[in-house]
Amino acid sequence: MPQTQAQNPAPTVPNHIDKYNFKWRNSMSDMRVRFAPSPTGYLHIGGARTALFNYLLARQNKGTFILRIEDTDVERSTQESVDAILAAMEWLGLEYDEGPYYQSERFDLYREKIQFLLDSGKAYKCYCTEEELTQKREVALQQGAKPQYDGTCRKLEQERPGQPYVVRFKTNPAGNTAFNDLIKGNISFDNCELDDMIIQRTDGTPTYNFVVVVDDAEMGLTLIVRGDDHVNNTPRQIQIYAALGYAVPQFAHVPMILGDDKKRLSKRHGATSVMTYRDMGYLPEAMVNYLVRLGWSYGDEEIFSMPELIEKFSIKSVGRSAGVFNPDKLLWLNEHYIKTGDPQRLGALLQDYLHSDGVDTNADLDAAEVVKTLQDRSKTMVEMAQKGAFYYLDELNYDQAAVEKFITAEQTEIFSAVLEQFKTATFDAEGIETAFKQVLEQTGLKFGKVGQPIRVALSGGTSAPGIYEVALVLGRERCIKRLQRAIEMCRGSK
RNA sequence: GCGCUCUUCGUCUAGCCUGGUCCAGGACACCGCCCUUUCACGGCGGCGACAGGGGUUCAAAUCCCCUAGGGCGUACCA
């Protein structure tokens, strides 16, 4: 871990207000950024976007992207959540350079820093009980006053050995604390709005607002990009940086993502877990593209590959207002990436989705060719699997209505004619087309008459890729088998 | 309540800093037409916004003020 403590010199950055002689980090060079999720659930849309922005910035500036797991709340943190977050980041292609660091493994460091604050009179022990505090808060709220800690223990003359306590940070009550947010601009808070926050719980564990400062500083972070639900925490964190003698990094607070009712995005708005989008057949590049465009833009451009993003992304072009998550646009992007994706790669993916549907893909079919016939017709990989299952199925799931209409005694002639042609035709695009032309000549029918019955015979339903394509991908053997089956079915019908 | 902050089509946004080129551009969605062997793809077109009110100015989406609405925070959660 780099030693970054306290040697940061002059705040030459004009961006920064430097009222209290805080030491500001002063450049974007050697950029170090981080994503610091707390492992209390899966990686959600909002977290993924924050991670993505950090990743992009790190790559663009040839900096370092650090992953840190904020698991100081031992009660709510789980290993499953860590695994889920790691898996989601990997899926999205957000590779980190350092970490994951676990805060739960760094308690010694935090304890040391808290002791330092205690020793230097910048923090104090507070013996107020939780009940007392909530009561005071309620009273204050009722009287229309600020629900702040009243500082009872701040003035305590001596310690009370044996009595449980929390440690509070002694906030500077005078003046104000300001910072220049790279997204939101200058933000200033009157210090009287800040109360003495708890930095160590009764059980001895440190709290978020404290450890986040220690870690961000100790890990040498130059820029903090995080959700704007943290802007209110920033002034108190800045005071801690100062008290600990750390240089203050730059901040960029990313606006929240809202649901369609303009409320903070949550489960009741539908899927918010990144990984469930994979399960629903979304491609990671679609998710990345969607996420980055939510709150950021680059002229009129909509489509961005990861390399393009690394080149074009800019924190300056990130909007200041919250954005509504729009599943339709995500779907459209997914459709786009499926349409333009590499058939080979999509073919491999398709097999996985097929397997999830219980379809055996051990047939001698070229998955890439299968994909090519379905790319223009599928918005998701799940949809592609549904539409493409018929290629692999030995026993087709016939659409009843289609069968009653198109696989009847009077179609037998068509099936037989095509069957005969297929037996001898050259089985390539041209050969198949010729075979059909022959049939049309023989029977004197128009393609419209022949097409649907054959489509149903080969695919089981009335909606499928073009007949020539289907026949070609299926290959002679399967086509013949399916046509024979259709003829049998015709006999069975009246 | 208090604090911070935000406000251009239903949604994501361009434009705002450096007023005129904006009776506001793009994208998704929606609607219509065309293409078509099914289903799709695609092409073309349409609908649709400067939150409201004052001011400054020859001229305001762009500058100033007020109002309204939204989001976040106000935890021994992160």
Image (spheres, rainbow, N blue to C red):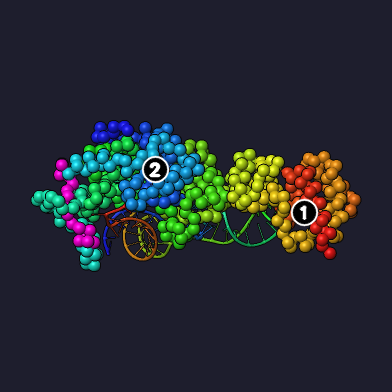
Tag nearer the camera, 1 or 2: 1
Q: Looking at the picture, how far across and down is residue B53, in whole percent? A: 39, 65
* Chain of the residue that carries numbered disc 1 in the rendered image: A
The residue lying at 78 percent from left, 44 percent from top is: A477
Q: Do circles 1 and 2 both sit on a common chain?
A: yes
Residue type at tag 2: Phe
Give the quadrant of residue A149. Answer: bottom left
The structure residue drawn at horizontal position 70% and vertical position 50%, both measured from the top left corner, is: A393
Residue B52 image position (x, y, % from top left)? 41, 64
Question: What's the residue at 86%, 47% (across, down)?
Answer: A420
Q: Position of residue A281 (x, y in %)?
A: 57, 50
Q: Nearer the viewer, residue B2 or A345?
A: A345
Residue A126 lies in the magenta-colored region: yes
Horizontal side, residue A479 vs residue A42: left or right: right
Point out residue A7 in the picture as x, y percentages from the top left corner.
25, 32
Give neighbour class at mark 2: few <14, some 14-19, many 20+ (Cα, 10 Å): many
- The residue that disc 2 covers is A35
Q: Quadrant of the C terminus of chain A?
A: bottom right
Residue at 44% from the left image edge and 35% from the top image edge: A59
Give the residue type that dot 1 points to.
Ala
Label 1: element kind:
helix
- Which numbered disc, 1 or 2, marks the residue that appears first in the sequence? 2
Can residue A465 be seen here? no
**Residue to which mark 1 is pinned:** A457
Residue A159 in sight in this render: yes
Q: Which residues are magenta?
A: A119-134
